[in-house]
Amino acid sequence: MSNTNLKKLSEELGLSISSVSKALRDSYEISAATKKRVLAMAEKMNYQPNPFASSLRRKKSITIAVVIPEIANNFFALAIDGIQLVAQQKGYHVLTYLTHENFKNEESTIKHLQGGRVDGVLISLCRDTDDIQHLVSLHETGVPLVFFDRVPERMECPTVTTDDYESGFKATEHLIQAGCKKVACLSLSNYLSITHKRMKGYEDALKKHQIKVDPKLIIQCTNDNGTNLQLIKKLLSRKDRPDGIFATVEKLAISSYYVCNDIKLKIPEQIRIISFSNLRTASLLAPSLSTITQPAFEIGKESASLLFRMIEKKTFGNRIDKIVLKSSLVQRNSSK
């Protein structure tokens, strides 16, 4: 039996594993000259494809995978609804994998999906994803891959996101126009693209209104609710406490409400709050929560539609789609 595998063949040819795999499958994305070269080298090196993997490539699983960090977040629940709608129209099943905001879980899930178990993958990164090698490896196998909401910044790939920078700017400016002079920013992770963009919007809105960016008002929170409550309580118990809070994710706004209730801080009289949130009951909170509402359902739909275009090979050459949908600011009582 030959010891030549796809990796060795790609190294000998000086091509990516993905390109060699596509050439062997007679993909329209590969030129005739490259296909001829790959087939000649495969014959020379006595390359024998893995029959199990080959059968998986020939036979579609009629299943796509969705990898998300959590399900309690209302954004992801709505996004999955949009994904399910498109998948059902295509006659596909959806497998949902939760990483629980843990990089090791994400890494092992992606490695599990590399064996051809699904026809495509939709993924939103967990909060501590810094190393993206597992994602690069999946991409190189040729499995159609689309990132949504939380996307890698160092990888050229199809993405579906919202206007995070503009929304961060609008949220902060909204608090300033409501009278806030000291706006705090509660963020979830330094690794996530959404954090960088939303915080950049926050900082630029402060600068526009001649308010100095105070590092002490930028709080790096964690995935542990108890720790977040302590961090926010410490922030709001200071003598020079902020008079406004911009929460970059929903859970941090809810934690802020708990802390304000605990230390008897009145919203919005003593502190105003706005948050990225798709919480269906935002209008029922006391006081109702002002939100940057993402088009979560539409993001799910667009992500799935883009993935199926890739699965059905209806993409245009090597074009990498980067779809951005707009969020909306909904003012309620928490920021009046």
Image (cartoon, grey):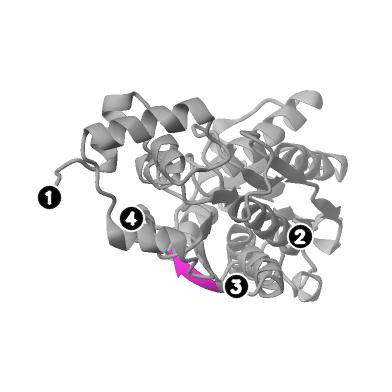
Q: Is residue 80 visible?
A: yes
At numbered mark 3, what does the secondary structure look like: helix, strand or loop?
A: loop
Label 2: how many Cα within 10 Å (few below 14, some 14–19, many 20+): some
Residue 18 horizontal side relative to residue 148, left or right: left
At numbered mark 4, what does the secondary structure look like: helix, strand or loop?
A: helix
Task: Find disc 2 in the rendering and name its residue.
Answer: 298
> Mark 3 is on which residue type?
Tyr
Task: Find disc 4 in the rendering and name its residue.
Answer: 111
Q: Residue at x 64, y 75 (%)?
A: 91
Q: Residue at x 76, y 31 (%)?
A: 205
**Vertical side of 258 occupied by 313: above or below:** above
At numbered mark 1, what does the secondary structure look like: helix, strand or loop?
A: loop
Mark positioned earlier in the residue sequence (2 or 1): 1
> Mark 2 is on which residue type?
Glu
Label 1: how many Cα within 10 Å (few below 14, some 14–19, many 20+): few
Q: Tell me the quadrant of the picture where the C terminus can be found.
A: bottom right
Circles 4 and 2, Cβ within 8 Å, touching? The answer is: no
Mark positioned earlier in the residue sequence (3 or 2): 3
At numbered mark 2, what does the secondary structure look like: helix, strand or loop?
A: helix
Give residue 92's mark. 3
Magenta span: 94-98
Residue 284 lies in quadrant? bottom right
The question of residue 164 being in magenta is answered with no
* Distance (Cα) linking label 1 and label 3: 37 Å
Circles 1 and 4, Cβ within 8 Å, touching? The answer is: no
Task: Find disc 1 in the rendering and name its residue.
Answer: 1
